[in-house]
Each structure stands twice: as C-alpha cells, then as structure tokens.
Amino acid sequence: MPLNYFVLAEWDLAQERLSVYLEKDQELESIKNISFRINSSSKKNLGLPEKLALNFDA
C-alpha cells in the first residue's frame, strides 16, 4: 500500500519563519509554524542589511 502523504517545508527568510505542511490528496494542511532568528553577524558577513528582504518572485 503506497503512502499518499508528503511533508513540505517553506523557509520565509524575510519574515524569519519556517512553515511545515502536510499534503494528502493534493490538499495542504499547515501543521507547524516556527519563528527563528537569523544571526545578525551572518547577515553582516554576507553584506546584507540588518532586516533581510528577499524577493524570489522576480
């Protein structure tokens, strides 16, 4: 019997949030939302502004 479940993770770096979804029969259900902080030193090492803003739609 095949498993018809998929777990998807979405990292939103601009909002510093991780969302985890469970997909069954092509329907997504949010099962977990976790806030996280990007270390400001990491942003500075990459030359990024303190408030990270990314646009992946372009």
Image (tube, helix red, strand yellow):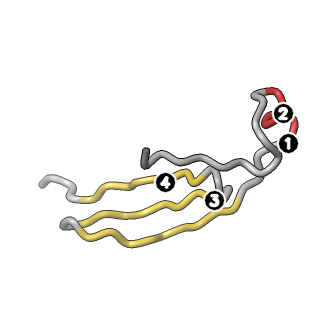
The residue furthest top is 45
The residue furthest right is 41
- Of marks 2 and 4, the one in the foreground: 2
Mark 2 and mark 4 lie on one chain; the one further toward the N terminus is: 4
State the quadrant of the N terminus.
bottom left
Q: Residue at x 27, y 59 (%)?
A: 5
Residue type pointed to by label 3: Arg
Who is closer to the viewer here, 26 or 56? 56
Residue 43 position within the rendered picture, expressed as x and y whole percent measured from the top left: 79, 37
**What element does badge 4 sit on?**
strand
Q: Which class describes the residues within 10 Å of circle 3: few (<14), some (14-19), or many (20+)?
A: some
Q: Which class describes the residues within 10 Å of circle 4: few (<14), some (14-19), or many (20+)?
A: few
**Residue indicated by mark 2:** 44
Residue type pointed to by label 4: Glu
CA separation in Å, label 3 and label 4:
8 Å
Task: Check whether the beta carbons of the residues at disc 2 and disc 1 lie within 8 A of each other.
Answer: yes
Mark 3 and mark 2 lie on one chain; the one further toward the N terminus is: 3
Q: Residue at x 31, y 55 (%)?
A: 6
Q: Residue at x 82, y 42 (%)?
A: 39
**Quarter residue 36 falls in:** bottom right
State the quadrant of the C terminus.
top left
In the picture, the disc for residue 40 is 1
Residue 53 position within the rendered picture, expressed as x and y whole percent measured from the top left: 66, 49
**Residue indicated by mark 3:** 17
| 27 to 15, vertically: above or below | below
CA separation in Å, label 3 and label 2:
20 Å
Residue 42 position within the rendered picture, expressed as x and y whole percent measured from the top left: 80, 34
**What element does badge 3 sit on?**
strand
CA separation in Å, label 2 and label 4:
24 Å
Q: Which class describes the residues within 10 Å of circle 1: few (<14), some (14-19), or many (20+)?
A: few
| 23 to 37, vertically: above or below | below
